[in-house]
Image: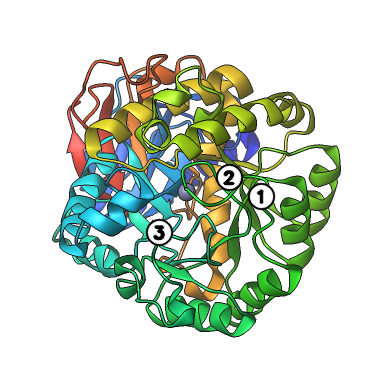
Amino acid sequence: MKNVLRLTALALSCGAVFSASASSTLFTNVDIFNGTENKLYEDHYVLVENNLIKAISAKSIEAGDAVVINGEGKTLMPGLIEGHGHLLLNGGTLNDHENNRTIEELASRATVNANAVFQSGFTTWRDAGGLNTGLRKTIDSGMLEGPRLYTSGAFIGPTGSHADFSNLTTLNQHLNGPQTSMSRSNVSVNTDTVGEIKAAARQNFKQGNSQLKIMSSGGVASSFDPWQLNAMSAEEIGAAVEVADAYGSYVMSHAYSKKAILRNLDAGVKTIEHGFMFDGEINKKMKEKGAYITTNMTAFSPYLSQIEAINSNPASKRKAESATKAFKNYISNVNKYQPKWGFHTDCVGDVTSCIKQTDHTIYLAGKELGNFYTLKGMTSVNGEIVKLSGIMDPYPEAKLGVVAVGAYADLLVVDGNPLEDLSVIGANEKWFDAKEREPALDTIKVIMKDGKIYKNTL
Ligand SMILES: [Zn+2]
């Protein structure tokens, strides 16, 4: 990259002056973390023209009447990307969402959550189920400051799976029982046949969602499914992949057990969510298939049992205990095989609890997997993952998660070197006992999305 930078500088010294307009911004005196390399490019210049990065150079850039931001030696880096969040699931347990929360309450609180995560530095958000495209339209129209949204629409999973929000006594909808509140709002659909899976998948894409989320194994924060459950057959997973493929997109799959993970990969699923049984065999298959894994590192927190969706549900509490034992090799296997790994928080809750969970997740990822691997997972790797949505990509013009010429200008300037200290983007060893903080972090000095400056405290 250094050679490329020298060439850029040379071209400039030969008289190539950029036609900077009022919509241009020139960052001077910044150290660049580019999202892909474990180093900083010191004392650089970055020119943004309209919504894209136009030039990066070690030498000064002639940029006409561009707005100049002197970075004062601070670090310029890609905006953060959440790999697996749930903006609409801002209540407590899954049943709490079904029984006590109207879609109005969930949706209005999702706007608050979207704004809070944006102020925390997340300029792109892959939503892993529940959220449809209304919030994206609101943000993209300029009415609300928030991240770019890649939504999955309704969770797709069978009766009794991790996608089943109904009560124990609710008669199955497919046996003449009532529709759940969550299925009426396209938050979660129970699908028990290949035909129902295809219908739900097509409904999600019809509404403009960018990828599908299936629940192919059991989980912890739900009532009726052992985490070891292999909830969907190969044929059923294949049905979701077939519809996603028809839309040029992909399937992300909640999968805990090894059997479920391998079944997903064989069926063409591109991102394994959680994937705690990750090992050498899974790694080999992931490589063959060009697949990714994203994991909520809170599963390895000493404070896990304090999470509300777990401690208020005896079934979840029991499951968490057995799961923690079974997942003991995950961290050493990830460190050994270094798969294409995306950062994810999987937070379900309100702003205060999700800020704490996110900060703690960043800390855990850094501690267990290293700062660079964590940062790559929060930027370039998650940037690659969202781009798997192909023709359903709502932001198709450029790359995300990297500081590179031609990429979207989604940038942060942070006070400190995140490769050495993740607390500059919020990392916190504490979780539930952490001090409450405002969504806006003092250490994040500049937030730019799509070439527009949303925050500048330099
Ligand atoms: Zn999730």
The answer to whether residue 264 is left or right of residue 445 is right
**Vertically, is 59 above or below 193?**
above
Q: Residues within 10 Å of mark 1 (few under 14, many from 20)?
A: many
Q: Quadrant of the N terminus?
A: top right
Q: Amino acid at mark 2?
A: Val
Closer mark to the observer between disc 2 and disc 3: 3
| Label 1: which secondary element | strand
Q: Are marks 2 and 1 in contact (CB under 8 Å)?
A: yes
Residue 225 location (% of width, % of height):
57, 51
Give the residue displayed 21% in from the left and 59% down from the top.
107
Q: Quadrant of the C terminus?
A: top left
Closer mark to the observer between disc 1 and disc 3: 3
Give the camera-side residue of 35 and 19: 35
On whether ligand 1 comes within 8 Å of the CB at mark 1, the answer is no
Q: Amino acid at mark 1?
A: Tyr
Residue where numbered disc 1 is placed: 292
Q: Which label is found at residue 165?
A: 3
Closer mark to the observer between disc 2 and disc 1: 1
Residue where numbered disc 2 is placed: 381
Give the camera-side residue of 4 and 432: 432
Q: Is residue 342 visible?
A: yes
| Label 3: which secondary element | loop
Q: Residues within 10 Å of mark 3 (few under 14, many from 20)?
A: many
Q: Are marks 1 and 3 in contact (CB under 8 Å)?
A: no
Give the residue displayed 28% in from the left and 47% down from the top.
90
